[in-house]
């Protein structure tokens, strides 16, 4: 298996119009979760990906598994919970450049994942284990499961890729979030932070200073997301800024970081240099923002290549 990832995916209600949620009367049902977004992104690029999770024994769980399985992702280790529901969240497009997300995930099926639930065979064949800082914040039992996953990956030679993916609402307080995010970053081979996450962990610094702070934790490779400016890579003495891609209008920014992770992992799996992998990640992140939905804008390989080389036409006939 190229990449295994673990985390909660929820039923997503996205409004069919812009404006405050109180004035919204119709929604479209989609699905969103950082880890499954990455798994889908990799599958669309031709890689083998596996998503591990727990969902409710409900209609949302049925529809979600059908959707993710239909994208070519291995869901054979996903389990159903007859007592806890599949989580739900809502998006709100208040106005241009003001998107808000509201989660209803407390005591969800995924929050009940624990160390006993996780089998070694679900991870042992992975080349990469992709993790985010969301999962350990869901519950103490998820934290124990998360730490077991890291031990299994290390014991079987898999590289660990960690995206801090800060969600303060799921942590008890900022000190707890900071403590555990640093801990899990230090146990990873590759870390994919954003500027805001780095600032939360280390205070105000320059991007170059941030990557040094991450290296001080013992991390070999840091690929920092800089938004529309691109990304900054740092590994084995190489420090280089990788340019971003211009997007005329951002439709939905949610999921861009997950697309970036999928693009980087795909590049590494294809044997590309770190610079090439980061550039591909920048392109993936940009493409996703132009489509409504977390996973809907993830490209296949031909679309990605056309976007990167500028050959994509406004109308294809």
Image (cartoon, helix red, strand yellow):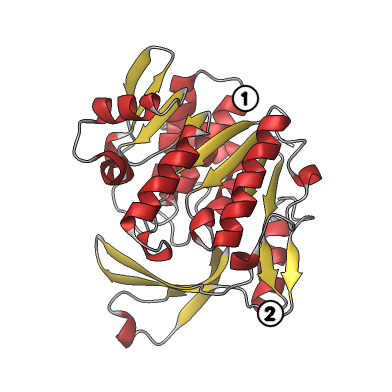
Q: Earlier in the sequence, mark 1 or mark 2?
A: 2
Which residue was labeled with disc 1? 270
Residue 111 lies in quadrant: bottom right
Q: Residues within 10 Å of mark 1 (few under 14, many from 20)?
A: few
Task: Name the spot of residue 300 as percent of width and height, x first.
Answer: 59, 42
Residue at the (54%, 40%) spot, across then down = 262
Depth-wise, is mark 1 or mark 2 nearer the camera?
2
Q: Is residue 59 above or below residue 141?
A: below
Task: Name the spot of residue 26 as percent of width and height, x first.
Answer: 44, 84
Q: Is residue 171 left or right of residue 10?
A: left
Which residue was labeled with disc 2? 59
Residue at the (72%, 36%) spot, across then down = 126
Q: What secondary structure is found at the residue carrying circle 2?
A: helix
Residue at the (75%, 64%) spot, across then down = 79
Q: Is residue 56 left or right of residue 139?
A: right
Q: What secondary structure is found at the residue carrying circle 1?
A: loop
Regarding residue 107, the answer to whether it shows in the image is yes
* Image quarter of the N terminus: top right
Number of the label disc, if any, that sits on residue 204: none
Residue at the (67%, 36%) spot, across then down = 153
Foreground residue among 81 and 273 = 81
Q: Is residue 84 left or right of residue 107?
A: right
Q: Is residue 146 above or below residue 66?
A: above
Foreground residue among 127 and 72 = 127
Mark 1 and mark 2: span between their CA atoms? 37 Å
Task: Name the spot of residue 272 as percent of width and height, x first.
Answer: 55, 20
């Amino acid at each position: 298996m190229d990449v295994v990832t673990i985390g909660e995916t929820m039923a997503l209600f996205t409004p069919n119009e812009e404006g405050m949620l109180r004035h919204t009367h119709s929604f479209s049902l989609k699905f969103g979760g950082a880890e499954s977004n990455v798994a889908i992104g990799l599958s669309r690029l031709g890689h083998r990906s596996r998503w591990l999770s727990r969902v409710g024994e409900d209609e949302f769980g049925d529809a979600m598994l059908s959707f993710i399985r239909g994208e070519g992702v291995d869901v054979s280790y996903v389990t159903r919970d007859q007592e806890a529901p599949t989580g739900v969240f809502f998006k709100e497009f208040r106005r241009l450049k003001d998107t808000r997300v509201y989660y209803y995930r407390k005591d969800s099926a995924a929050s009940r994942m624990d160390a006993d639930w996780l089998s070694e065979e679900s991870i042992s064949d992975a080349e990469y284990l992709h993790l985010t800082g969301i999962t350990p914040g869901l519950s103490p039992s998820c934290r124990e499961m998360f730490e077991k996953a890291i031990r299994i990956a290390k014991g079987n030679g898999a590289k660990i890729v960690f995206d801090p993916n800060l969600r303060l609402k799921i942590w008890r307080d900022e000190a707890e979030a900071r403590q555990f995010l640093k801990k899990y970053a230090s146990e990873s081979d590759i870390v994919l932070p954003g500027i805001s996450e780095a600032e939360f962990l280390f205070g105000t610094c320059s991007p170059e200073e941030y990557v040094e702070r991450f290296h001080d934790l013992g991390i070999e490779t840091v690929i920092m997301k800089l938004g529309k400016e691109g990304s900054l890579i740092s590994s084995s003495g190489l420090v280089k800024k990788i340019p971003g891609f211009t997007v005329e209008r951002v439709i939905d920014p949610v999921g861009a970081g997950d697309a970036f992770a999928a693009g980087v992992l795909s590049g590494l799996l294809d044997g590309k240099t770190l610079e090439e992998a980061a550039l591909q990640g920048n392109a993936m992140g940009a493409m996703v923002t132009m489509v409504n939905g977390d996973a809907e804008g993830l490209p296949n390989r031909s679309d990605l290549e056309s976007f990167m080389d500028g050959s994509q036409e406004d109308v294809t006939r």
